[in-house]
Amino acid sequence: MGFIVFAIPVFFLLIGIELVIDRLKQSNLYRFNDAVTNISCGLSQQVSAVAIKAFLLVGYWYLYETYRVFDIPNTIWTYALLFVGVDFCYYWFHRYAHEVSAFWGTHIVHHQSEEYNLSVALRQSIFQSVISNLFYLPLALIGFHPLAFVMINSIQTLYQFWIHTRTIGRLHPAIEFVFNTPSHHRVHHGINPKYIDKNHGGTFIFFDRMFGTFQEEEEEVVYGVTRPLSSWNPLWANVDYYAELFRSMQPAQFPDKLRMLINKPGWRPDYLGGPLYPQPITSDQQRKYDTDIPMSLNYYILFQYVILLGLATAFLLVAKSLPPIMIALGIGAILWSVANIGGILEKRPWANILEPLRWLVIPLLVYLFLGASEWWLLGVGGSVIVGLLSIGWLMIGLRMSLQDK
């Protein structure tokens, strides 16, 4: 996770560059509410990983120490082979994450945005690593060291950031033949019937060519999922698919309930209408989810994000040294924050209550984190001032929202 944390400033620099290009070309690649939700999902995933990833890596380490077949030397060729091995395992995880309904629920978050820009790369599921890590365990049995795996896996993840863009067209044919590129990955995010479940590669595209899941970018890509999320709440984004899946399972007979979990998303028994298939769609036919709030509230959310990103980054950097109760409080506070922001974007009444309450609780959390430090007075005092400013700003924005009605 360390690589990802230190890459965060670079991510936002590149997003800023893409925003400038977007404005100059007037290509409308970004919507504020969509981009904020993408980043909120990524932030939720990163802070939740503090509690999840260490546990998951225990399994890899145990298999390596107990059952590895080879003692692989630490050479440049080892890392090269491991890089290909990681991408091979990622291909099969990614493919099954699209083809097995229960797995799709851990990956769908990444596809829910109806836009396609660099912020979408940050949109990740809290639960995806629970499934994806299982697919890497054969590398432990072969004998690839856990630390080498973590490093190469992080690099492979970082590579996939830049391919989430429409500002780069097709590259040289030799590059397009071997590597996953923006053109190939745009196809992967399409809900056009010919694009669904294609181009699963991470860094390389030749596994898709080998196993029959490759598709060139041809017609204009329409982005999103076939049943739109229609929400800016990053926490709901992680459970929406499962809520719908279990609702649809209720009238099914027991064996078919299991089939609905392990078959492709949308599978239904004949007596419930049969499988659901994606319908042809064009960008003109797509009706994107959107909400409108006063500009003052948009600026409020931007202000909150500057604070939140700074605090979340600091939390990620020191999390390993914190006791479990402080880790739980930190994760809870950040998830509370992003949920409130989603609620404000959706004009949810509960957000109007929970957001001021959040700023009443934050000084206490700051004291708990800094209580033994000489900085506690400055931290608590600063959080009280920012909290009062935030509550006042929010109330003005909400009043303007009522006037607009």
Image (cartoon, rainbow, N blue to C red):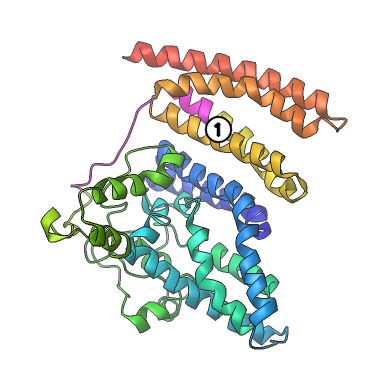
Taking 176 as reference, is 360 above or below it?
above
Disc 1: which residue: 337
Residue farthest toward the right in the current orientation of the protein: 374
Image location of residue 185, percent across then percent down: 39, 64
Left or right, 27 with respect to 4, comes to left
Left or right, 265 with respect to 145, comes to left
Quadrant for residue 188, please give it.
Answer: bottom left
- Residue 298 highlighted magenta (yes or no): yes
Q: In the image shown, does 234 or 326 lie closer to the viewer?
A: 326
Residue farthest toward the front in the current orientation of the protein: 254
Image location of residue 36, percent across then percent down: 47, 39
Q: In the image shown, does 250 or 12 lie closer to the viewer?
A: 250
Residue 185 can be seen, yes or no: yes
Q: Residue at x 30, y 72 (%)?
A: 216
Q: Residue at x 39, y 61 (%)?
A: 103
The C terminus is located in which quarter? top left
Q: Magenta residues?
A: 284-302
Image location of residue 117, percent across then percent down: 43, 52
Label 1 amino acid? Ser
Q: In the image shown, does 46 or 6 lie closer to the viewer?
A: 46
Left or right, 151 with respect to 167, comes to right
Taking 122 as reference, is 185 above or below it?
below
Q: In the image shown, does 235 or 395 lie closer to the viewer?
A: 235
> Total marks drawn?
1
Residue 161 can be seen, yes or no: no
